[in-house]
Amino acid sequence: MQLSERSDSRPTPLHDLRVVEISDRIAGSYCGKLLLDAGAQVCKIEPPQGGWLRRYTASCSPVAEDGTAPFFSYLNAGKRSMTFAPGAEDSARFRATLGAADVVVVTAGPARAAAMGIDPRQLLEHSPRAVIVTISDFGWSGPYADRAASEFTLQAWAGSPGFRGDPAGPPISIGGDLGEYMGGVFAAFGALAVRRRIERGGPGEHLDLSMLEALTAMQSSEWLHSQLLRVPPIRRTTEVPSIEPAKDGYVGITMVTGQQWLDFAAMVECPQLEEIEQLRFQIGRWQYRDLIREQIHPWLAERTVAEIVELGQLFRLPIAALGNGSTIRDLEYVRQRDAFIHNPAGFHQPRPPWLMSACAPARVGATPSLGEDDDESPWRRDESESEPALDGLPLAGVRIIDLTAFWAGPAATHLLAAFGADVVKIESIQRPDGIRYSGGMRTDVDDWWEYGWVFHAMNTNKRSVTLDLGSEEGRRLFTELVAGADVVIENFSPRVMEHFGLTAEVLLGVNPRLVFARMPAFGVEGPWRDRVGFAPTMEQIAGLAWVTGLPEAPPVTPRGACDPLAGVHAAFAVLTALSFAERTGKGQLVELPMLETVLNATAIQAIESEVFGVTLSRRGNRGHGTAIQNIYRCAGDKDDWIAVTIRDDAQWHALVDVMDRPEWCRDEALSTVAGRRERADEIDARLAEWFARQTLEPTVERLAGAGIPAAPVVSPSLVTDNPQLRERGFFEALHHGSTGLGLYPCPPFALLDGQDHWLLRPPPKLGEHNEEILRDRCGLTDEELTRLAASGVIGTRPKGL
């Protein structure tokens, strides 16, 4: 089945969805872009002077006085633009515009939203079938709801830099505003999920999204790691090996499974590394880092990056050349797959990160000038009748067959299940989900495969069936499940489903209304289809690693944050295709290459390289743009660090007051953003001296009280202590039959109206629901189940154990 890689005359998956976007941050604009690409009409409401993103460049390259920054065009091409100012006339037009929308996206907390005249309760009283999505730093409730924050300080609260970097140096944040894209795609998914309920007669909703929770969802639930494997809170480290020097540059190396480690040791001709059992687990390699590097660096130094990558593919290992803004568009994958498309503003950008067999994304439109649509009449309010009301969660009644493994795929179905979908996870006793045991192993329990912490975090609300798809009976039962499903989703390498004979043609022949979603690393077709890749591989190729790390040191891999990023994009794309299937009766193949998800999140690198000739690189924790920010060591011997961002003049003057107005701050040249940027190194050194004399927690509170974004750098193992996350209900307690009581992550939204909790089931044991589901959906008898278990088609224990 062919997937088009260009926009064409096919329909978009969404139809007749009207979105109003009121956003001055990347997350809201990206949410609107995702919905527009899928076929929505999006009206962007701006202040009369325009938002700051119209002129923002990460490289601080100048934009013509009457021009628009290319990054703004990437996020907003094809949208309408309307401006509103305070006043009676504008107020009436503003209310009419909001009242006619199906979805309203607002990036503001409660105080700022009120100042803009936006009250979700009033909007829902006027438009009870609307979805009001608010995106704010901490959400609209909880003790931190009114605190100032930045994507950088939210990373610190979420535990991201707390487990990244050499302990001999500072913690390292992820470069490139990655959290903003995570917040944006979560918002787009939530809007579509609730909209589905509305179309079935359900109520509208205020979806309250917390960026802190979205960023915490990008971590690998390390608190469960500590609980389940009984290990101390994780400290910052880097993977070993990771990004290593080769003969002509850096090469990215990612070894996740024990078998991959053994194959890597053979490839680099270091058999001695096969003999140390701890090295088969990522967590065990840090203490051997000097030995590993001492052994592998001479071999790497004799070979070029291209030679190492080619050899890695022969060994089926995730090894990649590092990409950056100046190289991404020249990748063989990008060229042969047409992964970049033309923007009418005069540059190239990544295409939407999904391909469909029956639908196509909207063509890239022109960037609207400020207020271009002010004279247009507002949309008319939709007064059409909806279907009879259905009780339950937004995705109640949706049946999903989940073949995914590791982190990215399960993250997609985790979100779909939380919103009410009935998800059946398919594994086999011959090959259980590898994330059950790839990070470490309990040796004091019999069912050690039930203790994988990422598996626990990403598989709540699901049921488990084991089927040997290599057997005829396993495939027959699988196709019976497919016949009654709405969605099948998998993230194997492309050849696996072909090997089983379960191609898109076969599955859509069984169920023509089926959404068959595939999440290969590098696409189901093309030059890299058979390459092996995990999230760190994508982070290395797509430029994210290139902008993460200290300027004087090698790039640093973000450590898998793009797994959940890819997962939520997949969940969003599944909902768009499901909307099309429910509207037209036509299913289709949906392809979601993980690499293209990350390329969309790093788009600014390739765009600014093309337009300005600048290659963004590592700035440590200083970030790009004009803000003053860094992670500073605090007083004491506890390895305490504080993350601080100073974005504007008001925050600068507030910081000066907190520091009791030292002499060096009184220089008038420092009172402007431009002046501070010119002397950023001097300011950074002065701030490092001041913070080194301050204790961590009181200083965070003093800065927060002054309206300054500040956060302690915490271990991701300890985020469960965060009072904001606890009060918002981001963690819910569930009891698992093997591991006992644990805290599990929820979607980054406040509970829906009338909802008591997000999580209804603990993560399933292997094959726990074999009898329940195979009896109910396939009509099997006790005798048939017994026979299938005896022959290994089903089971509850990995084969050979």
Image (cartoon, rainbow, N blue to C red):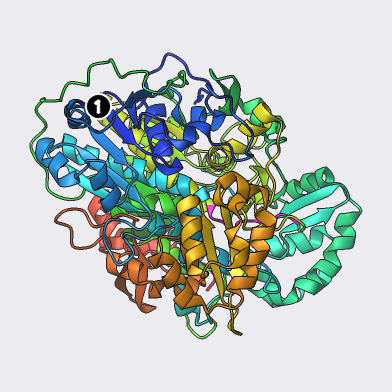
When asked about the image quadrant of residue 30, the answer is top left
Magenta span has 389? no
Of residues 189 and 662, which is closer to you in this image? 662
Left/right placement of residue 563 relative to residue 727 reads right
* Residue 26 visible in the snapshot: yes
Chief SS of the magenta region = loop
Left/right placement of residue 167 relative to residue 759 reads right
Residue 5: percent from left, percent from top? 54, 24
When asked about the image quadrant of residue 728, the answer is bottom left
Residue 676: percent from left, percent from top? 61, 51
Give me the residue at 51% from left, 43% from top. 500
Of residues 507 and 237, which is closer to you in this image? 237
Residue 680: percent from left, percent from top? 65, 54
When asked about the image quadrant of residue 258, the answer is bottom right
Label 1 belongs to which residue? Answer: 583
Give me the residue at 47% from left, 81% from top. 446
Which kind of residue does numbered mark 1 sit on? Answer: Arg
Q: Secondary structure at mark 1?
A: helix
Q: Which residues are magenta?
A: 554-561
* Residue 219 visible in the snapshot: no
Residue 801: percent from left, percent from top? 52, 74
Give me the residue at 82% from left, 46% from top. 305
